Amino acid sequence: MLNVPVKNIMQTENALLLPPATSVVDAAVQMAARHVGAVMVVEQGELLGIFTERDLMCRVVAKGLDPKVIQIADVMTRHPRTVASEKSYGHALIIMQENHFRHLPVVDDGKLMGIISARNAMDPDLEEFVAETNRRVAMRE
């Protein structure tokens, strides 16, 4: 499973794409309705950033900002790290684990293709991934 290309695992159907001028409250309502933890912020097909449930908590609620007024462009993570669809699922998981990401956009030649989320890692091959990560950590020590 870890050698499977990202394109075979990424989410495309349920991926939530919104324009940068969307209010935080509108984004949160759509995230809740779709049961997703991240919004990919796009304009004319270009990925501008990602707005996650963590951004909502840390950059809006914790700072006392009004989610009805604030746009996701103001609090999103700009120019997020991405992965190419031909890369292995294991490669994507390592990027996510090493950078403490729960969501990783999939981009090919500047075009947004989908998203990988930590939920994708909740499968029987997770044990194999953990073992590989532990092996890499042991090699560094």
Image (spheres, rainbow, N blue to C red):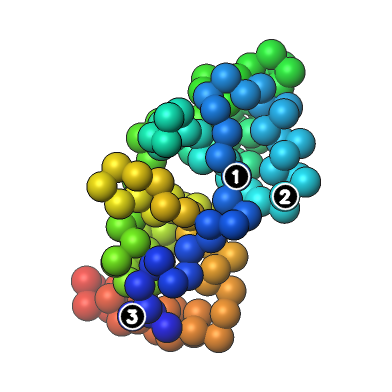
Residue shown at 52% from the left, 71% from the top: 121
In the displayed structure image, the side of residue 88 where residue 76 appears, left or right: right
Q: How far apart are the alpha carbons under marks 1 and 2? A: 8 Å
Q: Amino acid at mark 2?
A: Arg
Residue 128, percent from left and from top: 43, 85
Residue shown at 44% from the left, 72% from the top: 8
In the displayed structure image, the side of residue 115 where residue 5 appears, left or right: left
Q: Amino acid at mark 3?
A: Asn
Q: Amino acid at mark 1?
A: Leu
In the displayed structure image, the side of residue 51 where residue 94 appears, left or right: left
Residue 21, percent from left and from top: 57, 19
**Looking at the rendering, in which quadrant would you find the C terminus?**
bottom left
In the displayed structure image, the side of residue 111 where residue 37 appears, left or right: right
Q: Secondary structure at mark 2?
A: helix
Would you name the residue on which mark 3 appears?
A: 3
N-terminal of the pair, mark 1 or mark 2, is 1
| Residue 98 in sight | no
Would you name the residue on which mark 2 appears?
A: 34
Q: Secondary structure at mark 3?
A: loop
Would you name the residue on which mark 1 appears?
A: 16
User: What crowding class fits label 3: few (fewer than 14 Cα within 10 Å), some (14-19), or many (20 or more)?
Assistant: few
Residue shown at 44% from the left, 79% from the top: 130
126 in relation to 88, above or below: below
Q: How far apart are the alpha carbons under marks 3 and 1? A: 26 Å
Answer with the quarter of the image where residue 24 lies: top right
N-terminal of the pair, mark 2 or mark 3, is 3
